[in-house]
Amino acid sequence: MSFVQADREELAMELDLQRKMLRDMLLARAFEERVAQEYAQGNIAGFLHLYPGEEAVGVGVLHAAEPADYVVSTYREHVHALVRGVPANNVMAELFGRKTGCSGGMGGSMHLFNRERRFMGGYAIVGETFPIATGIGYAIAMRELPEVVICFFGDGAVNQGAFHESLNMAALWKLPVLFVCENNHYQIGTEIHRHSAVAEVYKRACSYRIPARRVNGMDVLAVHQATEEALAQIRVGNGPQFIECETYRFRGHSMADPGSYRPKVELQAFEKNEDPVKIAIAEVVYPSAEQITAVGRDNIANLTESLRSGGHFPAEHVDVMQADVAAEVEEAVRFASESPEPTLDDARAALDCNRQGEVLV
Ligand SMILES: Cc1ncc(C[n+]2csc(CCOP(=O)(O)OP(=O)(O)O)c2C)c(N)n1
Ligand SMILES: [Mg+2]
């Protein structure tokens, strides 16, 4: 294969990846905004924690993972499940409490699960993901497989004892765990400087000699690149890695929270200048003639060429994608609302299944 051919293939792959990530960013936003509406209409019950503003983290991290890797997530996990490939129909049906949901309609928003996609669950207890991911990492290490477990958690979880216990073990035993902090700067209504003595979360990993980095969690390409590098280190047997993604949630902590503790200007500034979906579009869309001209005549040829070879594509593609994800979300709502609820027999079968798994030692 010639160098030119190899270059072209690499570019085509990069372009394909950018398209997929952008589509997932758009799907994530559309899905969550629709879920908020369905909640307001009473079609979804219980606690509901949404992801708008944080899409670049889940999308960037999970697009760098392999299908054989495991994912452990928190209660803010709808988008993680979607990006991992759990069909939108089954995620929506779970939120609606229907039998066709990915947890049989018995888990709800905070307990999505899908074995085929190695999506090992959303967990409601803050800090619960650490020991679970560490245990999975231990299982992978015992079997000597080239797999990794990705452990998501919020900035509020790092003051739990389980954080320190798990990082210590993972480092000591060189377990294949990627710790990903979604630092949205708030633990419900408490801003990070009021809940953490060390607000630069990534610095905590050095207590356990775990290589750590901080990345702009509003930039999907930056998150993706940092994750690729970290995963490559883990896969060659160098033990755990740690990424802190700085991000922001555009909604309240949950649907029960109006989020009035945050200064309005702070939210507005993030929505206007830091919206990860807008940033992703700007990164992958080929600029208009006016934008190119604005750069200055001399630079036009260079810029055009570098953007072309960088795999950018026209703005109309985004409109097509928007329509496509809107149809996917619409279909998910139809599927969920037409699905039956689980029966008492279903509940009993799930209980029996759990009991069969109990082993006395
Ligand atoms: C052990 C425990 N303590 C308290 C709670 C209540 N609680 C639910 S979410 C949350 C905030 C967690 O914040 P963070 O880890 O930053 O995640 P975010 O919601 O910002 O994504 C708290 C305190 C809980 N679920 N578990
Ligand atoms: Mg937080």
Image: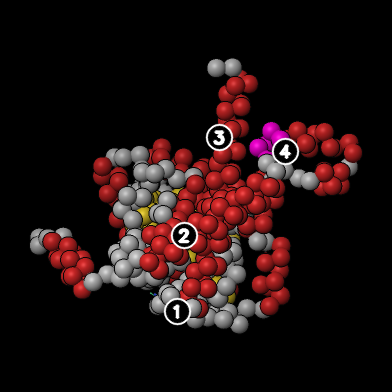
Image position of 37 with respect to 276: above or below: below
- What amino acid is found at the position of numbered circle 4 in the picture? Leu
Mark 1 or mark 3: which is in front? 1
Give percent across and percent down for residue 18. 59, 44
Gap between marks 4 and 3, in whole Å? 15 Å
With 41 as the anchor, is 191 left or right in this view?
Answer: right
Residue span colored magenta: 308-312
Contact, mark 1 vs mark 3 (Cβ under 8 Å) = no
243 within the magenta span = no
310 within the magenta span = yes
Residue designated by label 1: 42
Mark 3 secondary-structure assignment? helix
Mark 3, residues whose alpha carbon is within 10 Å: few (<14), some, or many (≥20)? few
- What amino acid is found at the position of numbered circle 3 in the picture? Met
Q: Earlier in the sequence, mark 4 or mark 3?
A: 3
Residue designated by label 3: 13
Q: Earlier in the sequence, mark 1 or mark 3?
A: 3
Q: Earlier in the sequence, mark 4 or mark 2?
A: 4
Q: Residue at x 13, y 61 (%)?
A: 356
Mark 4, residues whose alpha carbon is within 10 Å: few (<14), some, or many (≥20)? some
Residue nearest the viewer, comparing 45 with 181? 45
Mark 1 secondary-structure assignment? loop
Q: Is residue 121 visible?
A: no
- What amino acid is found at the position of numbered circle 2 in the picture? Glu
Q: Quadrant of ligand 1?
A: bottom left
Mark 2 secondary-structure assignment? helix
Residue designated by label 2: 331
Q: Residue at x 32, y 62 (%)?
A: 100
